[in-house]
Image: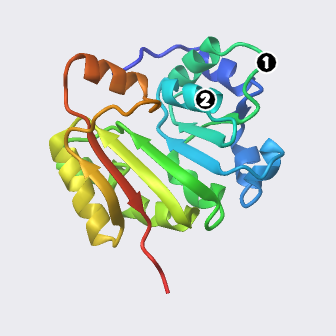
Amino acid sequence: MRLRRIPQARTLVENHSLVIKEQTALDLTGRWRQLFGTDKPLHLEIGMGLGHFLQAAALDHPEHNYLGLEKRAEPVMWLLKRLTEPYPANLRIFNGDAARLKEMFATGEINMLYLFFPDPWPKSRHAKRRLTAPAFLREYQRILEPAGRLIFKTDGAAFYHWSCDNFREAGWYMAEASEAWPLRKGEVISGYERRYRELDMPIYYAELTPPVTS
């Protein structure tokens, strides 16, 4: 879903207390838990969109810290408009590009990583932009702790199989996979997933752990 451009979105987002500015994010490399003031596990959602999952997860699971990364300002703005004070203490947002992961996080700093319905970039010449392209998988492997997990969901069969092939080739262990993922009791889902389920569309799911390195 494409959101119309809102000129004031960038300013509104940059000035919000939950949003981490780019230079601050780069300065926090290896020290993200200090930002939250606790040593709780750090969960990262890349491409959070409108943030429905992130908002619900932060409220339902105060035992974890949640960081959402989203390139576009407009969806971040709509999430911020939905939130009411007092804001969840375990929630922060970075309005920036996933290409900066290498500069933002130290090795093993993330405990859980979510990729929910990322842009499939269907044209072959754009394949390297897909968030499950090999270059991104190498970075996910680095920033996840050895026992960390990555959860990937999509509504596209071709994108799912292409992504799973990349995970396997890179040595990731597929703990669970489904081409018709059932909604589990208590499972927090995104707004995209809710809409797809209402249309009775299959949800493609994979839960993975990073390759074991010697």
Tell me if residue 14 comes above or below residue 203 in the rendering: above
Considering depth in this image, is 42 or 134 the residue closer to the camera? 42
Q: What kind of residue is marked 2?
A: Asp
Q: Is residue 105 left or right of residue 24?
A: left
- The residue beneath circle 2 is 60
Measuring from the top left, give residue 72's x and y in whole percent.
50, 29
Work out which residue is located at the far bottom of the displayed protein and give it: 214
Work out which residue is located at the far front of the displayed protein and give it: 185
Measuring from the top left, give residue 132's x and y in whole percent.
34, 53
The residue sitting at 27% across, 38% down in the picture is 181
- The residue beneath circle 1 is 86
The residue sitting at 84% across, 45% down in the picture is 37
Q: Is residue 178 left or right of residue 103?
A: left
Q: What kind of residue is marked 1?
A: Pro
Q: Quadrant of the N terminus?
A: top left
Q: How many discs appear?
A: 2
Tell me if residue 169 comes above or below residue 206 in the rendering: below
Tell me if residue 182 comes above or below residue 8 in the rendering: below
